[in-house]
Amino acid sequence: MATLGNPTNTIAVLQKYQFHFQKKYGQNFLIDANILEKIVDAAGVKAEDCVLEIGPGIGTMTQYLCERAREVVAVEIDAKLIPILEQDTLATYNNITIINEDILKVDINAIVQERNYGKSIKVVANLPYYITTPIIMGLFERHVPLESIIIMVQKEVAERMQAGPGTKDYGALSLAVNYYAKPQVIMTVPAGCFMPRPNVDSAVIKLTCSERPQIMVSDEKKMFDIIRASFNQRRKTLVNGLVNAAELTITKENVLAALEKMGLSSTIRGEALTLEQFAVLTELL
Ligand code: SAM
């Protein structure tokens, strides 16, 4: 078994299996041991943990996780990577389960039930950037029991997750992340730490999940429908965003009455509201 996390062994594995990178799967493999150590340290993986890794690639980070965790479940969409993982890079570990599936189609709650008796798991992922938001939202909205999520994302996405009201990066993702978790940027990762080099800068962000959301709201789904509708048309007022949203049946009069009760202007935009204000607005509507 080759120890990965360096260019030489990564190239050797890729050549041995004549592996060709698939752009559609966002394949950029980590080749820097220092970064890998830091990610696993930040995840705080302990000997009793069950870890879900999304997109193991050739198993670089997976090796680090298998060394530290009780059990690792790795979900990889690309069937060409499965023999590499099973027969080579992860062959010596007996604490790994490899699932060849699209993470968006996997019943993660069932995995948590089966592998960790329903107790919270840690998620570690170096994700393809185009599915970062659906994956994170999917984990949150399906109420997967989570301790934390450590993810490599595009630097801009990390900034969006930490953004506050009134800033250009503030949006539905910032609100969702802050409703379910506490975000903390761990480090930025230069393009040279990946093979092949991506065109964008990356950052590792840790989302520490709370057992209970940061604020109380009686209809979570409705609040997120309202949030999404408020940011759909960034240049429009909150009133127009909500009234024009297909998934909501809210009248202009209702929104105006709610805003008045909250002491907010009728021309306010969604980006000016805090999470708490969206919760109050949801209750009023
Ligand atoms: N974790 C490895 C590393 O750090 O070197 C690989 C990271 S690479 C950026 C992303 C990985 O996610 C690829 O192996 C890709 O095939 C896989 N992937 C892409 N879309 C996926 C999906 N929907 N479900 C599961 N895996 C996916």
Image (cartoon, grey):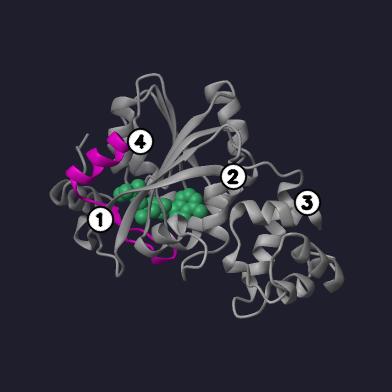
Decide if residue 90 is in sight here.
no
The residue indicated by pointer 3 is 283
Decide if residue 159 is in sight here.
yes
Nearer to me, 154 or 66: 154
Which mark is first along the chain, 2 or 4? 4
- x and y percentages locating residue 225 in the rendered image: 71, 59
Do the residues under discs 1 and 2 have CB atoms within 8 angstroms? no
Which mark is first along the chain, 4 or 3? 4
Do the residues under discs 2 and 3 have CB atoms within 8 angstroms? no
- What span is colored magenta in the figure? 19-42
Crowding at label 4, few (<14), some or many (≥20) Cα neighbours within 10 Å?
many
Which mark is first along the chain, 2 or 1? 2
- Relative horizontal placement of residue 251, taking residue 146 as reference (left or right): right
Residue type of the residue flagged with mark 4: Ala
Label 4, label 2: how far apart the Cα atoms are:
18 Å
Which mark is first along the chain, 3 or 1? 1
Do the residues under discs 1 and 4 have CB atoms within 8 angstroms? no
Locate residue 33: give its quadrant: top left
Badge 2 marks a residue whose secondary structure is helix
The residue indicated by pointer 1 is 189
Mark 3 near ligand 1 (CB under 8 Å)?
no
The residue indicated by pointer 2 is 140
Q: Nearer the viewer, mark 3 or mark 4?
A: 3
Residue type of the residue flagged with mark 1: Val
Q: Nearer the viewer, mark 2 or mark 3?
A: 3
Badge 1 marks a residue whose secondary structure is strand
Residue type of the residue flagged with mark 3: Glu
